[in-house]
Image (tube, helix red, strand yellow):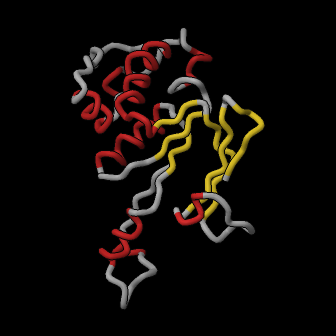
Amino acid sequence: MVAFIDVHRYSPFKGSMNVDERMIEMNTLPVVVVGGGPIGLAAAAQLRERGLTPQVFERGPVAGAAISEWNHVRLFSSWAELIDPAARRLLDATGWVAPDDDAYPTGQDWTSNYLQPLAAALGDIVQLGTEVIGVARRGRRRQHRGPHHRAGCHRRLRHMDHPQSARW
């Protein structure tokens, strides 16, 4: 989930701290997107367009893995409604051939013609086969171990190749 807040209105850092300095500081923190489906990949494309580099974690072996349970179903929305504008711009730059905006794809069409090319265009920020077990703000855990203790948040992940492993 991505939330955009008007920091000039809601900022707790009024007074001595410059709001622009706080925004610069916030932009150095890691951004984690949980899920490599249509919403998660669109969020990643939006973040990339804004100059941020998110990490996308998808539990399944491919982008949009949950859609494979209903690959045969035709969607009620046309391609024009399913393709995020930032994702379209990113894909267009790769030479991607967009489907007919007026057509209604199946789940399989959606994943193979949009989600998987989008994940490929986003590159190595999309980590497939990685389940997010938990996310905590820095200072909210009892122990601080590992390389992420300075990153603003801790991520507990389980990799598909090593289901017993979990790390913060």
Residue in the picture at 36% in, 48% down: 47
In this rendered view, identify the residue nearer to me: 83 or 104. Answer: 83
Residue 14 can be seen, yes or no: yes
Q: Residue furthest bottom?
A: 16
- Number of marks present in the image shown: 0
The image position of residue 86, as x and y in percent, is 29, 38
Report the side of 147 relative to 133 (left or right).
left
Q: Quadrant of residue 28?
A: bottom left
Question: Looking at the picture, does residue 91 appear above or below residue 164?
Answer: above
Q: Residue furthest right?
A: 164
Question: Looking at the picture, does residue 23 appear above or below residue 67?
Answer: below
Residue in the picture at 53% in, 23% down: 62
Residue 82 can be seen, yes or no: no
In this rendered view, identify the residue nearer to me: 121 or 3. Answer: 121
The image position of residue 150, as x and y in percent, is 54, 66
Report the side of 102 relative to 30 (left or right).
left
Residue in the picture at 67% in, 53% down: 168
The image position of residue 120, as x and y in percent, is 39, 27
Q: Quadrant of residue 93?
A: top left
Question: Looking at the picture, does residue 37 appear above or below residue 113?
Answer: below
Q: Quadrant of residue 92?
A: top left
Residue in the picture at 39% in, 70% down: 25
Q: Residue furthest top?
A: 72
The image position of residue 127, as x and y in percent, is 52, 35
